[in-house]
Image (cartoon, helix red, strand yellow):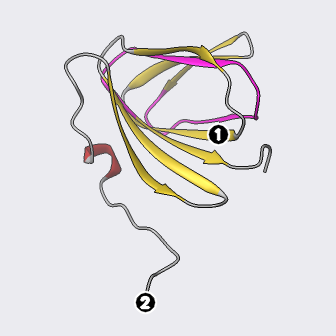
Amino acid sequence: MMKDYHVVTNMAGQLEIPSDGVRSEILYDEADAKATLFAFARSAHFFEHTTPDSVQIHVLAGEATFTVDGDILEVSEGSLVYIPAGTPHGVRAQTPAVLLATFLKGGKQ
């Protein structure tokens, strides 16, 4: 019987942080939400972009700088950033960092 839940332990250690760039792994992808783990090398970044879904980003390890709708946010381990669907945003790792992005499908949830 297939279960309707997901368990991931030690998320911060799930992905090896690359020496350059970003590594990612989809943890689950369901009808209403998708969770993707990202491991960033120091100074690795995603240029400003938008997504059709709202997204919650948990900083599991390290420090990063987000731009969200023109605002600059300095965040570190334990921080949560919520970004509504369609809002311009980008991120740059200030240190090696691990981020969990949970996309809430269907826009603002």
Judging depth in this view, the residue of 63 and 39 nearest the camera is 39
Query: Which amino acid type is shown beneath numbered disc 1?
Result: Val
Q: Which residue is mark 2?
A: 1
Secondary structure of residue under mark 1:
strand
The residue shown at (74%, 16%) is 69
Q: Do the numbered discs 1 and 2 sit on residues whose CB atoms are within 8 Å?
A: no
Tell me how far mark 1 sits from mark 2, CA to CA.
Answer: 30 Å
* Mark carried by residue 16: none
Callout count: 2
Judging depth in this view, the residue of 39 and 61 nearest the camera is 39
Judging depth in this view, the residue of 70 and 54 nearest the camera is 54
Residue 74: x %, y % from top left: 54, 18
* Residue 23 sits in quarter: top left
Front: mark 1 or 2: 2
The residue shown at (73%, 10%) is 70
The residue shown at (44%, 15%) is 45
The residue shown at (78%, 43%) is 107
* Residue 94 sits in quarter: top left
**Part of the protein shown in magenta:** 76-98
Residue 72: x %, y % from top left: 64, 12
Q: Which residue is mark 1?
A: 55
